[in-house]
Image: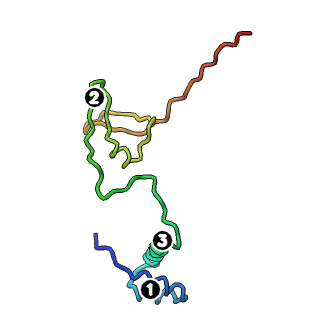
């Protein structure tokens, strides 16, 4: 993957504000496509605080956490909190487990329906 281009974001914002034609801006910053220009412009707006940054539900870190899990004496799989946070796993989620030739596959499952029991009334 090629290194990320560094853009003079202030200059880009000024050119857009001064209504410089798109073709000129693309040539000045050496953008090959209009999508590259739009992404750079959006990033410049977010970095300047003019547009709020989009927050992700998934926890972000440079490297994924250690992926080793353990089976406890009761037979439960213990997933470290850092790994659960990284993948956005929430308490009470249900999963299906299947055995395959390569190991185990864990997939999200639909939650089980909750049955509520009502107390018998004294009259009935």
- Using the image as rendered, state which of residue 88 and residue 99 is in the foreground: 88
Instruction: Report the residue at 44% width, 41% height from top.
Output: 90
Instruction: Report the residue at 27% width, 45% height from top.
Output: 67
The image quadrant that residue 83 belongs to is: top left
Work out which residue is located at the far right of the displayed protein and give it.
Answer: 123
Quadrant into which the C terminus falls: top right
Disc 3: CA contacts within 10 A as few (<14), some (14-19) or many (>=20):
some
- How far apart are labels 1 and 3 at the CA level? 15 Å
Among numbered discs 1 and 3, the one appearing first in the sequence: 1
Q: Which mark is residue 46?
A: 3
Q: Mark 1 sits on what residue? A: 11
Quadrant into which the N terminus falls: bottom left
Determine whether label 1 and label 3 are within 8 Å by CB.
no
Q: Classify 40 as above or below 117.
A: below
- Using the image as rendered, state which of residue 67 and residue 1 is in the foreground: 67
- Using the image as rendered, state which of residue 73 and residue 41 is in the foreground: 73
Instruction: Report the residue at 40% width, 81% height from top.
Output: 31
Q: Position of residue 55 (x, y in %)?
A: 47, 59
> SS class of the residue under badge 3?
helix
Q: Classify 37 as above or below 83.
A: below
Q: Which mark is residue 32?
A: none
- How far apart are labels 1 and 2 at the CA level? 58 Å
> SS class of the residue under badge 2?
loop
């Amino acid at each position: 993957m090629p290194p990320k281009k560094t853009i003079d974001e202030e200059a880009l914002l000024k050119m857009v504000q001064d209504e410089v034609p798109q073709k000129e801006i693309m040539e000045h910053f050496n953008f090959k496509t209009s999508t590259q220009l739009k992404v750079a412009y959006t990033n410049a707006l977010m970095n300047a605080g003019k547009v709020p940054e989009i927050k992700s539900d998934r926890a972000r870190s440079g490297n994924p956490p250690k992926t080793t899990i353990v089976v406890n004496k009761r037979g439960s799989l213990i997933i470290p909190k850092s790994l659960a946070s990284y993948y956005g796993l929430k308490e009470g989620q249900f999963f299906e487990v299947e055995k395959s030739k390569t190991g185990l596959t864990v997939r999200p499952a639909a939650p089980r329906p909750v049955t509520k029991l009502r107390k018998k009334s004294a009259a009935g």
